[in-house]
Amino acid sequence: MSVLDQIKKLEEQKQKLMADAKAEAMAKVEQGLRDLAELGFTYRLVSNDAPTRTTTTRAPRKGGVRDTVLAAIKETGSINRSDLLAKLDAKGDTKAEQSISNALANLKKAGTISASGGNYTIAG
């Protein structure tokens, strides 16, 4: 028997031993999952062989608050946050105020608007 034949035979033995070891370990894992299920816990076994879940692509932004904020800044030319909140009828509405603040930050980060002296203007 040649060296290559011996290596091939050893590789086959290795594959069989690995498969047997995996089957033994999987039996233990499955028993553990059954024990957990009896205690009211739900777990799922995931294998590297299983296809991974694909993440859904994020839907494009639908406009909304950013467009409204941008339109208000364009209309006034220059506006501070407080006046913008009043103009958009968001004063006192914590969620709306936060959305507007987020929109201002994102528009500024994108370079669409600029802030100077507390006033927001369309970037030039």
Image: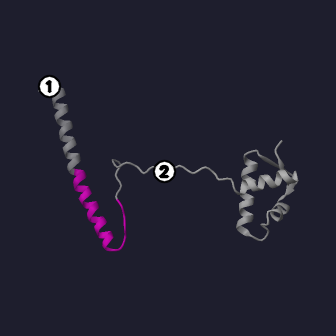
Quarter placement of the N terminus: top left
The numbered disc on residue 14 is: none
Q: Earlier in the sequence, mark 2 or mark 1?
A: 1
43, above or below 20, in the image: below
Task: Return the residue found at the far top.
Answer: 2
Location of residue 86 with respect to 9 vertically, above or below: below
Residue 12 or 63: which is nearer the viewer? Answer: 63
Residue in view at x 31 percent, y 65 percent: 33
- Judging by the rendered image, the residue that carries numbered circle 1 is 2
- Give the spatial CA distance, label 2 vs label 1: 50 Å
Which corner quadrant holds the C terminus? top right
Q: Is residue 120 visible?
A: no
Mark 2 vs mark 1, foreground winner is 2
Q: Which residue is drawn at 86% across and 56% down?
A: 79
Query: Which three-letter amino acid code belongs to the residue tagged 1?
Result: Ser
Q: What residue type is labelled 2?
A: Thr
> In the rendering, at what x and y percent does residue 107 appear?
74, 50
Crowd rating for badge 2 (residues with CA inside 10 Å; few <14, some 14–19, many 20+): few
Q: What segment is highlighted magenta in the picture?
A: 21-44
Q: Relative to residue 19, is residue 31 depicted above or below?
A: below
Instruction: Give how far across and how far down residue 77 sits, in percent.
Output: 87, 51
Q: Is mark 1 on a helix, strand or loop?
A: loop
